[in-house]
Image: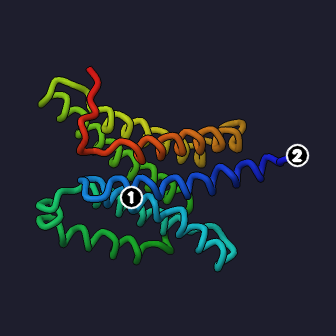
């Protein structure tokens, strides 16, 4: 019989494999960098865990979330904000010893809320311009909400965290399959 921890590991490692596919499928789209970073986060965590015999540090997760935000900026905005975008991680790296675990979690959740706002902006802008809801943007918003809920569980602590992580992990695998099939630049609108 398969144990709960084995089932959790199966979902986790399946998610790693599945999330490589969107990065391949979104190649040469506006969201390629975003999906590439998503595809790298969990493998980096596994490699780090294997060699360090510990979970990936929260400061590194925070930097990955920061990279996800940068991946959503236009090239013009990156050029305009380049000094600020470089200064933020430098200040962050210097202040790592001063930040408590709880504040790292708040920071990661805040970063994911910023990512959600980006996706919501894309969804609303597309709707205003075309009078149709873009399914791709809608699914990005919904995906990001599941990430925020999953991270919030680390602070709030739902009564059955393992079951919650299991179901959000399955939902994220389904999102991975969706983004492996549907490209951002395809006509994916619903009325």
At horizontal 70% and vertical 55% (from top left) the residue drawn is: 9
Locate residue 50: give its quadrant: bottom right
Q: Is residue 113 left or right of residue 74?
A: right
At horizontal 40% and vertical 59% (from top left) the residue drawn is: 65
Q: Is residue 55 left or right of residue 184?
A: right
Q: Position of residue 81 (x, y in %)?
A: 16, 65
The residue carrying mark 2 is 1
Q: Nearer the viewer, residue 156 or 44?
A: 44
Q: Nearer the viewer, mark 2 or mark 1?
A: 1
Q: Is residue 10 above or below residue 190?
A: below
Residue at the top extreme? 191
The residue carrying mark 1 is 24
| Colouring method of the image | rainbow
Contact check, label 2 and label 1, Cβ < 8 Å = no
- Using the numbered discs, state the Cα–Cα distance from disc 2 to disc 1 in whole angstroms: 35 Å
For the C terminus, the image quarter is top left
Q: Is residue 187 above or below residue 172?
A: above
Is disc 1 placed on a helix, strand or loop? helix
């Amino acid at each position: 019989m398969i144990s709960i921890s084995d089932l959790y590991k199966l979902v986790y490692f399946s998610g790693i494999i599945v999330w490589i596919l969107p990065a391949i499928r979104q190649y040469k789209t506006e969201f390629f960098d975003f999906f590439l970073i998503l595809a790298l986060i969990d493998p980096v965590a596994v490699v780090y865990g294997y060699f360090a015999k510990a979970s990936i540090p929260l400061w590194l997760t925070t930097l990955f979330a920061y990279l996800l935000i940068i991946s959503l900026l236009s090239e013009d905005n990156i050029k305009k904000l380049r000094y600020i975008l470089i200064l933020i991680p430098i200040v962050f790296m210097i202040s790592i010893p001063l930040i408590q675990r709880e504040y790292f979690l708040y920071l990661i959740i805040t970063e994911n809320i910023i990512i959600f706002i980006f996706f919501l902006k894309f969804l609303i802008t597309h709707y205003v311009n075309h009078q149709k809801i873009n399914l791709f943007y809608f699914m990005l918003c919904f995906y990001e909400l599941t990430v925020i809920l999953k991270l919030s569980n680390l602070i709030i602590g739902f009564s059955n965290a393992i079951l919650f992580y299991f179901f959000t992990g399955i939902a994220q695998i389904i999102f991975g399959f969706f983004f492996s099939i549907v490209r951002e630049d395809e006509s994916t609108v619903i009325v």
